[in-house]
Image (cartoon, rainbow, N blue to C red):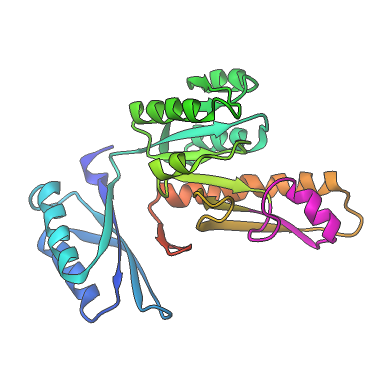
Amino acid sequence: MSHDNLTATLLITCPDQKGLVATVTNMLASRKLNILDLHQHTARTDSRFFQRIKFDLSELEGSREALERDIGEMAARFQMEWKISYSDKKKRVAIFTSKYYHCIVDLLTRWQIGELNCDIPLIISNHEDQRALAETFNIPYHVFKITKDNKAEQEAKEIALLREYNIDLVVMARYMQILSDDFCAAFPHQIINIHHSTLPAFIGAKPYHQAFERGVKLVGATAHYATADLDEGPIIAQGVVDATHEDEVEDLVRKGRDVERIVLAKAVNAHLDDRIIVHGRGTVVF
């Protein structure tokens, strides 16, 4: 990436108060930084302010460390939580998968053609089934067979491997294992799961079967951050497709898989682009 194309993205959240926008933009202007994109939102229920600013770094006056000190000082004054990322440092993504191909094939294809701006240095699975797929994309494939008796030990090995590879994001591409509380705590808001229903409806196993029994007229998928509470993490993206009384369970599964692919890719892209701020049990997605 050329120096002229360097950008940074700053995410901010804090109690809403007068002068926030002026303070942030003036601070960036003092460092000769040109704002390329700015979005903001105030949650009326708790007067919480959210902002995403993308700016050009090509004429940065001083170092990135000095810029971050400026942001830190501003954050201390306004009780801000903040995160900054730089376009010359791609996020490193690990894909977790089991036996279903549709989501992982979609993600890898999007990545290969440049739709996902990240590095994918490894794939982790609890089965051997997709090793050939990983080899096709020249990505190392690691298998950790998990049972009730060895789950804690295997997860510890997985976490160590993710740390070794400096992983920024874990994507559960229909990984058919429930991650432990310790695993989720090790990567807070850094694990995206795709659940094959429109949460909070049909939590847990066999949601398409549950939907069929209820005679639903829509089936869908939900991408959310994984937390200790099963299928209850902050929702990032959702999608639906029509269903009718003529659909059998297998029809709902087929329709739903199309939605799963799209919704998961949408959520992953939002994370990679730094467009998500977690707020309580939900999210603000710019």
Q: Is residue 59 above or below residue 19?
A: above
Q: Which x, y percent locates residue 168?
A: 37, 39
The residue located at (60%, 57%) in the rendering is 238
Instruction: Please say whether residue 175 is visible from this viewpoint.
Output: yes
Q: Position of residue 189 (x, y in %)?
A: 42, 50
In depth, the one of 165 and 3 nearer the eye is 165
- Quadrant containing the N terminus is top left
Name the residue rendered at 41%, 31% in the picture: 159
Q: Nearer the viewer, residue 216 or 273?
A: 216
Find the magenta span and give its range: 197-221
Q: Please, is residue 282 above or below residue 124 in the view?
A: below
x%, y% of residue 95? 51, 33
Which residue is most to the left? 62
State the residue at coordinates (48%, 22%). Answer: 139
Asked if residue 121 can be seen in this view, the reply is no
Lateral position of residue 197 relative to residue 144, left or right: right
Q: Residue at x 51, y 40 (%)?
A: 180
